[in-house]
Amino acid sequence: MDILAELNPAQREAVEAINGPVLILAGPGSGKTRVITHRVAYLIRTVGVNPRRIMAVTFTNKAAREMESRLDKLVSASVRDLTLGTFHAICARILRRDGKAIGIDKRFVIYDDDDQISLLKRSLQALSLDPKQFAPRAIQSAITAAKSQMIGPEEFLEHGRSYFEEVVQRVYERYQQLLTNSNALDFDDLLLKVVTLFREKPDVLSKYQARYLHIQVDEFQDTNLVQYELMKQLAGKYRNICVVGDPDQSIYSWRSADIRNILNFEKDFPDAKVVLLEQNYRSTKLILDAASHVISANQQRKPKDLWTENEKGLPPAVVETYSEEDEAQYVVNEIDNLVGSGEVKAGDCAVMFRTNAQSRVLEEAFIRYGMPYKLVAGTRFYERREVKDIIAYLRLIQNPDDTVSLMRIINVPQRGIGERTLDELTRWAREQGVNEYRALKLLAVSRESGDDLHFSARTVKVLAGFAAMLEDFIARSRELNLVALFDLVVERSGYKQYLAGLVDGEDRWENILELRGVAQDYQELKPVEGLTAFLEGVALVSDVDDLPEKQETVTLITLHQAKGLEFPVVFIVGMEDGIIPHYKSIDDPAQLEEERRLCYVGITRAKQKVYLVRAFRRHLMGSSTVNRPSRFLEDIPEHLIARGGVRESEFELSTNEVAEKEEAESVKNPPDFKAGDHVRHDQFGEGIVVNYHKVKNDAEVVVAFDGLGVKRFLLSFAKIEKV
DNA sequence: CGAAAGGCTCTTTTT
DNA sequence: GAGCCTTTCG
C-alpha cells in the first residue's frame, strides 16, 4: 500500500516534510489525524526510521489509543516500539525511570484534583488560614497557573503582590513541602519535574534527545508553557519536530493552554515549514459556512479559508423551546423522527452541552422515552467515593507516606479515630518532624517499649491497630498478585462489611467490583509491578477514554469532550447567553472568544445536520431564569439557517419557508429524482425510484432494489446518485 | 465519637 | 439542587 496515495497535496506535503521543524495548521475535518498517523507510518515504512526513535504526544488517552489503532493498521507490530501517549503519561514514565537524579523516589503517587484540594486544605490549616476566606479552589487555580508557567513558590511574588497573592505564595510553599513529605506529585509537577530534570541533568537530557529522532505533538494549540519547553528540550538535538494544531479550536486556556505557543513556534524555529490544511472533508457546505461565520466574529484570530467539496446539505436548524424539559423532549422526538425515517441510526446522533449539569434533564427525557443513550463521563467513575477509598488503600501500600490517602481512609470504615484524634496526630507528628505515617509507626514502637504515649491508651490502641493492618498489607503486597491483594484489602479493612451496612451499599459494591475488573488487567504482572502499573493507570485515565469507537446509541457529551469527534447529526443544546457563552466568561473578551471557539468546535463536529437548540426558560442554581438567545446565533446570517420551535404550527411555518428557499434553488439545480429513475446507493447498489416527495425540510426517496426490497431514504443522508 | 439535621456556598470545561 | 461544612444531640 502506498502511504501517500490517499492524501491530498497539502496533506502529502505535511507527511513528506520530515526534516526540520514543521507547523501544521489544520482546520476541523481536514484530515489531521490522518496526516499524523500517515506521517508516522511514512517515517517507519518509507524512510526506515526505527519506531523506538519516534515520539507522538497527544492530549487524551483516547486520542492516543485512536492513533494506536490506526497506526496498527498501517505499520502493525512497530506500534509497540513507539513512544505514544499523553504528556502526563510520558512524563510519569520518565520520572519513574530517571527521577531519582533529582531526588524523586520512584514510588511517588500522582495527586489528582481532589487530592490537591485536600492537601491545600491541610496546608491552609497548617498556616492557620481560614478556608472560607481563601477558597482552596481559587488557590489551586493560582498555583496551577503558576506551575504551568514554570513559576515556583520562590518566584511567585515577582509577578504581583496583592494580599491574596501573598497568601497564595505562603500556601504554595507549604503545599510543595507537604507534597514532598507525601512523596507525591500533582499533575503539573509531572511535567514540571521533567523539565527540571532535563535542566539540571544534561546527561539525562542528552540520553532522551539522542533517542528521539522525530517528535510529533497533536493539539498543539492546547499546550501550556511547560509542555512547550519540554518539547523544545527533547527536540534540541535533531530539531525534527512536527506540531499540529488549530488556533480556532483552542478551548483549554483555563487549563493554562497558551495559544502563543503557536506564534512562538515560528519565532523559535524560524526555518519551520508551515502547512495549511484547509479542505474540510467532514461537513456539508451550509454547516461549514455557518461555523465559519461564528468563528469569524473573533477579533484575535488569523483569517482562514476553509472550503469543502461536499454537497450543500441542509441549513442548520435554530430551534426555540419553552423550558429545558421541552428542549430535551424536542431533541428526543427529533432523533426518533430521524431514526424512524430510516437513514439515520441512533448512533449517528450526538447531543452536546456546555456544562455537565445540563445532562440530567436530557437523561431523564431519554429514559422517559425509552431511548437508549451513552453519557460520556457523566458518572466519573474514578471520582466515586468508594473507588477513591479503595485506591487510597492501595496507594498507601505502595507509598505509605501518602498523607492524603492516609487521612482519607484512616477512619473509613469507622475505627473510632475521630477528628480530634487526627488533629492531635498531625500536631504531634509535626512536633516530631515526621509525617503522619511515620508518627503512627513511632507510636506503635513506643507502645511496645512502654514509653510515654502522648495519647490516651484507647487512642493509641486504635491507631496502632490501623498501623499494624497497613504494615500487614505492605508485607503481603510483596507476594500477592494485584487481584488477591485487592480482595485482601477490601475484606481485611472492613470496607466490604461497611458497604453492606449502607443504604446504597449495593451500588457502591458494584463499583468496587468494576474497579476489581480493572485490576484484573494487571494480574499477570509481578506483585509490586502490578500495583504500580495499576495505580499509574488509574491516576492518568479519565472517563472520556471509554467512549467506544462506534456507538450504537445516541451520545450525550460536553462540547469540550466532543473535540476530535464527529457525528452525522449534532444537537447543541442551551444556545443561550449564560450557558453558551457561559456567564462566567461573558465579561472577559478573551474568555468570550474562547466560548465562541467552543461553539465553533461543536458545530464543526457535524457531518450532515446541526440543531442549535435553546430554552426560553431554564432552571439555574435552583431558581428559574429567562435567558436571551446566545449571541453566537447572531453571527450566523439568516439565510443560512432554518428556524423552528416546539409549537407545531410555528415549526411548520418556518420549515415551509425553508422549503420555499429550497424550491428556489432546485430551479437552478435540476430536480433531484422522479419515479422510474435508475439510481445507485453506496451500500445497496442499483435500484429504481418508486416514490419521491418532500418531507419537512428534506425529501424522501423510496427505492426498490433488486432482491433487497424497498428502502426509504432521506435525501440529505442517503448517498444516492442517478445512474 | 458518630449520626443526623440544618445551613452554607457555588456552580465550566479536564490531564 | 447538590455537595460540603457546621452544629447539635445521643
Image (cartoon, coloured by chain):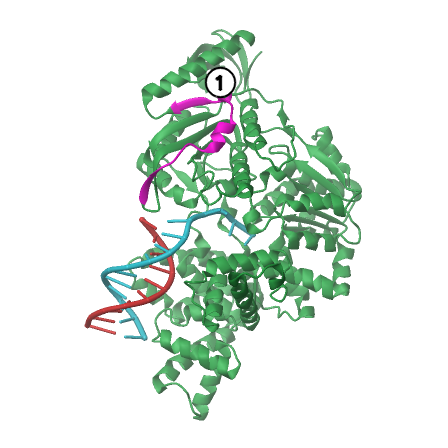
Chain colours: A green, B cyan, C red
Image coordinates of residue A240 in percent, x first then y, are 77, 47
A501 lies left or right of A613: left
Using the image, determine if residue A571 lies above or below residue A458.
Answer: above
Question: Which image quadrant is residue A554 in?
Answer: top left
Tell me the residue that label 1 is attached to: A715
Which residue is depicted at the point 50% across and 19% down?
A: A639
Indicate the amino acid at tag 1.
Answer: Leu
Using the image, determine if residue A521 lies above or below residue A104.
Answer: above
Membership of A440 in magenta stretch: no
Which residue is depicted at the point 40% across and 61% down?
A: A386
Image coordinates of residue A723 in percent, x first then y, are 58, 11
Which residue is depicted at the point 53% across and 7% down?
A: A667
Give the extent of the magenta segment: A623-644
Question: Which image quadrant is residue A451 in?
Answer: bottom left
A507 lies left or right of A703: left
Using the image, determine if residue A382 lies above or below residue A197.
Answer: above
Which residue is depicted at the point 73% across and 29% down?
A: A9
Q: Chain of mark 1?
A: A
Tag 1 secondary structure: loop
